[in-house]
Amino acid sequence: MKKVHISAMGKQIDMDNIRLANEDTIAIGNMKVNARGDELGFSGQVVKTRNQVMDEYYRLNTPSAREPLDTLDEDDWGTPTTKEISTPMASESSKSDAKPLIQSPKKSN
């Protein structure tokens, strides 16, 4: 599918043709790559192709699971039981019967 844009003057611009025509042009900036994404060396020669760069990236940054989910038991998921859950109403009623932790200073005569 072509990406054809129409300019303000009404001209049609084919962005894919422009990208293909400028693949070997050195990109502006300090990354030392061309417009295709290849890493460039000292005199603009290709050191690593875009595919080599992407393969290296995915080889180093692919997340891997420590343990497959097939081997986990249902007990390993740690489902909560009713004993572990406390209701806020029960804790509030016990607070009213409790003595204050800080006592007011006693006056001496």
Image: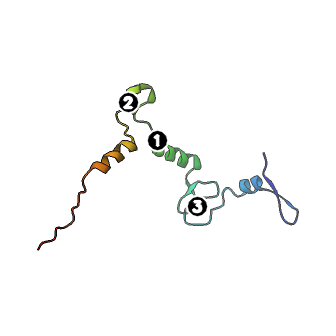
Residue 28 spot, x, y in % from top left: 62, 66
Among the 4 quarters of the image, the one containing residue 4:
bottom right
For marks 1 and 3 on the same chain, the one whose residue lies earlier in the sequence? 3
For marks 3 and 2 on the same chain, the one whose residue lies earlier in the sequence? 3
Q: Which residue is mark 3?
A: 44
| Residue at (78% x, 51% y) in the render | 3
> Quarter of the image containing the C terminus?
bottom left
Q: Which residue is mark 1?
A: 63
> Quarter of the image containing the N terminus?
top right
Q: Residue furthest left?
A: 109
For the residues labelled 3 and 2, say whether their Cβ atoms are less than 8 Å apart.
no
SS label for mark 3: loop
Q: Amino acid at mark 3?
A: Gly
Cα–Cα gap, marks 2 and 1: 22 Å
Among the 4 quarters of the image, the one containing residue 107:
bottom left
The reply, left or right, for residue 71 in relation to residue 14 is left
Q: Amino acid at mark 2?
A: Asp
